[in-house]
Image (tube, rainbow, N blue to C red):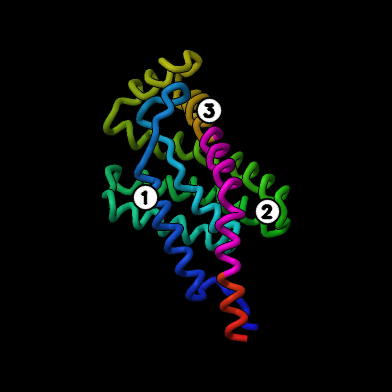
Amino acid sequence: MKQNHLLSVRNVTVMAMFGALAAVLMIFEVPLPFIAPSFYGMDISEVPVLVGTFALGPVAGVVMELVKILVKLILKPTSTGFVGEFANFCVGCSLVLPAGFIYRLNKTKKGAVIGMAAGTVIMTIVAVILNAVVMLPFYSHFMPLDTIIAAGAAINPAISNVWTFVILAVGPFNILKGVIVSLLTALVYKRVSVIIHSDSERRAVKTS
């Protein structure tokens, strides 16, 4: 029986499909005005990437994140000089890599839950830091930083500067996103993985 490897035709096809699906989902953002200003939109593009990561491994997760960004740029050109896409790639990888590594070590429901919880925490930390040192300074060229912070203060009066903004707005935003993405992934993973792995087994039997 031939060993299944990451760059098999089947796996490359799966990564391309899931990455493209993630790109489409990335376009559809929903603002969460009770947590963060309306220019922060939540999407569920990490769901197909997480599903693919659990099925194929953490390296595949990074590949799918890259495919997602590239396809998204084809569907909708950058409006941030690629800074937003770079940040999205980094934040996405900070979710799927820990989740994928932990699940790879413990391929159980508990392992998946721990992986997604760890990924959510790490993603939130990365998002907070990236927003503080990259995204907000970049967007301040288009919107005064005081205006951005004021938009956050209108939601949470405790916000008064960049760091309180990212901790009290960006942080909760990403925690909620991680929880929603994790729940959706938990709902669909088993159904999708059965299709992926059963197809793999059929191909392996034919070539053995």
Q: Amino acid at mark 2?
A: Ile
Estimate the spatial distance between the alpha carbons at disc 2 and disc 1, rounded to whole Å.
Answer: 27 Å
In space, the residues marked 3 and 2 are separated at their CA atoms by: 26 Å
Please state the horizontal and vertical placement of residue 42, each as a whole percent of the image.
43, 36
Q: Residue type at mark 1?
A: Val
N-term mark: 1 or 3: 1
Q: CA distance from mark 1 to mark 3?
A: 29 Å
Q: For residue 24, which numbered disc appears in the image?
A: 1
The earlier-in-sequence mark between 3 and 2 is: 2
Write the residue at 58% across / 41% down: 183
> Which quarter of the figure has residue 57?
bottom right
**Residue 43: horizontal and vertical position, in percent?**
43, 40
Hey, which residue is sitting farthest bottom in the picture?
208
Query: Is residue 118 found inside the magenta-colored segment of the image?
Result: no
Residue 182 part of the magenta-drawn span: yes
Q: Which mark is residue 102?
A: 2
Circle 3 Cα neighbour tier, 10 Å, few/some/many (<14 / 14–19 / ≥20): some
Whether label 1 touches label 3, CB < 8 Å = no
Magenta stretch in the rendered image: 175-198
Residue 31 position within the rendered picture, expressed as x and y whole percent measured from the top left: 39, 30
Q: Magenta segment, principal secondary structure?
A: helix
- Count up the numbered dots: 3
The image's mark for residue 167 is 3
| Structural crowding at the residue carrying mark 2, measured as other residues with C-alpha within 10 Å and reported as few (<14), some (14–19) or many (≥20) | many
Question: Which residue is most to the top?
Answer: 157
